[in-house]
Amino acid sequence: MKKYLVIILVLIIASCKSNSNPTSIDVIAEDYVKLVLEIGQYDNAFIDAYFGPEEWKPTEPKSETLPLENFVQRANALISQCDTLLVSDNPNLEHERINMLKKQLIAVRTKTEMMGGKLYTFDEEAKLLYDAEPPHFSMTHFDELLVELDSLLAGEGDLPTRYNNFMSEFIIPKEKLDTVFRVSIDESRKITKDYFDLPENENFILEYVTDKVWSGYNYYQGNAQSLIQINTDFPIYINRAVDLASHEGYPGHHVYMLLTEQNLVNTKGWMEYTVYPLFSPSSLISEGSANYGIDVVFPGDKRVEFEKEHLFPIAGISVNKANMFYKVQDLMSKLNYARNETARAYLNGGLSRENAIKQIEKYSLFTPQKAEQSMRFIEANRSYLINYNLGKDLVAKHVELLGGSYSNPEKRWEIFKELLSNPYSASTLKKE
């Protein structure tokens, strides 16, 4: 009898030890990917890219209604499993990996709750989805910038009219659009390859589309391949060629995603990076690095020289007013955060849709049609706006604090590559 009691006791102890062992990070990662893929069936914008195992994709047809409680419970369970790992005494734990996966899961849970009808304030949403705290500006700050712009573009008519009349001289003719873009992409790719060892097979397909709320988009396909789309709903100004070539391509989204696949998935086996939920902390790094990457690949006067010597002539645009054009664009970039304030006020219920559109017209100097498109972007993507300007500023500060200054381009590229190749979020970037 004692013999059997001993055996039973040993089995109970073994069972307790087995149950006390936390789930491995690789198992959590796989469950996370499968959860994201299931949720993605209910919102076409939820997943930006997937290049993982085909067998992980859902095979059962989705239910008629969003199974919100099921998804939230599963996300909470995975978050708890991450917490259990983080407090365990395993010296081999990859804490940065677990922390980042936990943040991604919080974002997935939050966005799923929003799909189910839950509302957050602009700042709450930004924190939960993007791990970020957006700055606040008074509109008087932007009014002062408009006064400065008004003085620069002196003449008859109101400021929006003068601005759009001036900018009309810098529109790329549609028949020359593809050539201008491909020259811009080729140059940004060539410079990027001087610093990054890109896969030999890396490539992209370039398409021109209409009826979108965005100006450009990169759909990463996996295996270092991308589909880049440019929206031609509205006139495209000459400076947008370099912007979009670098932001969507090199060293922007295309490079960010292929480095993620190459370094985190293929080399480290971190399978959670085979799926990219759009409304997540990864997007602040992705958008912020893509915007900052424009300055990295074309620093200072090098961009102006390239555009004036190559793009202006190809597009058939005179360089006579080019210097004024760049002064105007510099001022316009300082107005960038005004749209964040409009979005915050509108989404928090403090501004009507009509007045929000008027505010966008005023501070972005958009035509009514362009302001309407901008409003549709805000309604579709909400606080995602912060990833472009705040993301860029946070990435820039991180790189510069680590020694990647304008005067030290080699170091700048080195730190930038490290950022693109490892898990970062807004709260883990260097700030001081």
Image (cartoon, rainbow, N blue to C red):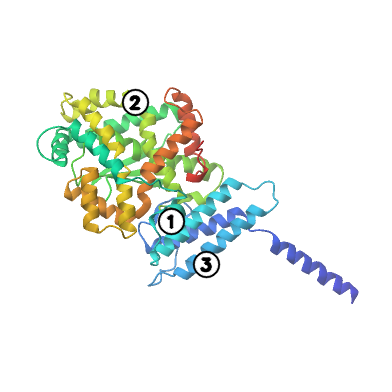
Residue under the point 60% across and 53% down: 25
Q: Which residue is mark 2?
A: 300
Q: Identify residue for label 1.
A: 124
**Front-lying residue, 307 or 123:** 123
Q: Residue at x 36, y 38 (%)?
A: 291
Q: Quadrant of residue 81?
A: bottom right
Neighbourhood count class around disc 1 (C-alpha, 10 Å): few under 14, some 14–19, many 20 upward: some
Q: Position of residue 14 (x, y in %)?
A: 77, 64
**Vertical side of 244 occupied by 83: above or below:** below
Specify few, some or many for label 2: CA neighbours under 10 Å numbering under 14, 14-19, or 20 or more. few
* Secondary structure type for disc 1: helix
In this view, the residue farthest toward the left is 156
Residues at marks 3 and 2 touching, judged by CB atoms closer than 8 Å: no
Q: Give the quarter of the image for residue 302.
A: top left
Q: Is residue 210 visible?
A: no
**Which label lies toward us, 3 or 2?**
2
Q: Given this view, does label 1 or label 2 mark the residue nearer the observer? A: 1
Residue placed furthest toward the right: 2
Quarter where residue 67 is shown: bottom left
Q: Residue 42 location in percent, x, y?
A: 38, 64
Which comes sooner in the sequence, label 3 or label 1?
Answer: 3
Q: Which mark is residue 73?
A: 3
